[in-house]
């Protein structure tokens, strides 16, 4: 178990590096360890969670889901609702999103948020990520009242967030902007999209897929507001 624990900690740390060869090697070693013994403890669950993260980052949502389910189920059997369980359920929600299963995305993410509330309190900014994902889930389920409610709850936590939560705040602004485009309120959508863009520019955030989606969303929003020149500019950048 100690070797499995060490490998798991190593691969979780490696996800922030660019050394994909090292990460793949660690993955294979973890899989070998899991196959070699009858593991059924929290170390096993955390290892399964790490494998799920690997596949999620590789855009292999179906495989990620299998590992997240194994990890979460084992923690359920041990009646352990801890930070790993919350993270596992949150990422399970992202995996469900990648497969288009928004109902299960909402269920997994909501459970993750409830665990975080018990651990950190209802006013902790660490809830922002989960609440933001719930906005996305309920938008895709056409349940706009819940999307609005969770979005507003998350907005109320922003003032307490530190610099480490800025990327989550940017994504929240994007999701709320999307919410208003779905409601055809393009003026409010513009406000939140521009706040997100401001965070990306001021804080030099990574220009990831969320940033590309933001630029295209701004292009569409400017178009519907009759701002054709800016619309073309943002579509070109996206």
Image (cartoon, rainbow, N blue to C red):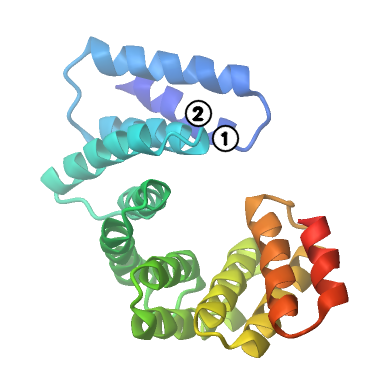
* Label 2 environment density (alpha carbons within 10 Å; few <14, some 14–19, many ≥20): many
| Tag 1 near tag 2, CB within 8 Å | yes
Residue 233 falls in image quadrant:
bottom right
If the image is split into quadrants, where does the N terminus sit?
top left
If the image is split into quadrants, where does the C terminus sit?
bottom right
* Disc assigned to residue 23: none
Q: Tell me residue 106's x, y (percent).
A: 31, 64
* Residue 46, placed above or below residue 185: above
Q: Residue at x 34, y 55 (%)?
A: 86
Q: Residue at x 82, y 57 (%)?
A: 237
190 and 82: which is toward the camera: 190
* Position of residue 210 in the picture relative to residue 95 (left or right): right
Q: How far apart, in angstroms, are the residues tagged by discs 1 and 2?
A: 6 Å
138 and 153: which is toward the camera: 138
* Position of residue 191 in the picture relative to residue 5 (left or right): right
Would residue 202 be seen by someone viewing this image from the given angle?
no
Q: Residue at x 65, y 66 (%)?
A: 166
Would residue 174 be seen by someone viewing this image from the given angle?
yes
Q: Secondary structure at mark 2?
A: helix
Q: Tell me residue 95's x, y (percent).
A: 39, 46
Counting the numbered discs, the total is 2
* Residue 191, placed above or below residue 178: below
Residue 117 falls in image quadrant:
bottom left
Residue 33 falls in image quadrant:
top left
Q: Residue furthest left?
A: 77
44 and 92: which is toward the camera: 92
Q: Residue at x 51, y 32 (%)?
A: 58
* Disc assigned to residue 15: 1
* Label 1 environment density (alpha carbons within 10 Å; few <14, some 14–19, many ≥20): some
* Disc assigned to residue 11: 2
Q: Secondary structure at mark 1?
A: loop
């Amino acid at each position: 178990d100690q070797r499995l624990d060490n490998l798991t900690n190593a691969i979780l740390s490696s996800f922030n590096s660019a050394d994909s060869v090292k990460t793949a090697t660690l993955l294979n070693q973890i899989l070998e360890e899991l196959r070699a013994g009858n593991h059924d403890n929290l170390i096993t669950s955390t290892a399964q969670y790490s494998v799920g993260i690997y596949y999620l980052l590789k855009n292999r949502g179906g495989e990620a889901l299998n590992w997240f389910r194994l990890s979460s189920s084992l923690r359920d059997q041990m009646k352990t609702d801890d930070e790993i369980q919350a993270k596992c359920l949150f990422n399970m929600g992202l995996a469900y999103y990648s497969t288009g299963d928004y109902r299960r995305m909402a269920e997994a993410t909501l459970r993750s948020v409830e665990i975080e509330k018990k651990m950190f309190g209802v006013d902790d900014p660490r809830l922002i990520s989960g609440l933001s994902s719930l906005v996305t889930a309920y938008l895709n389920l056409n349940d706009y009242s819940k999307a609005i409610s969770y979005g507003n709850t998350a907005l109320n936590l922003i003032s307490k967030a530190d610099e480490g939560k800025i990327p989550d705040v940017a994504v929240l602004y994007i999701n709320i902007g999307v919410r208003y485009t779905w409601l055809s309120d393009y003026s409010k959508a513009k406000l939140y999209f521009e706040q997100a863009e401001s965070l990306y520019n001021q804080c030099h955030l990574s220009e990831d897929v969320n940033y590309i989606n933001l630029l295209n969303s701004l292009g569409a929003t400017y178009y519907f507001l009759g701002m054709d020149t800016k619309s073309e500019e943002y579509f070109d950048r996206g």
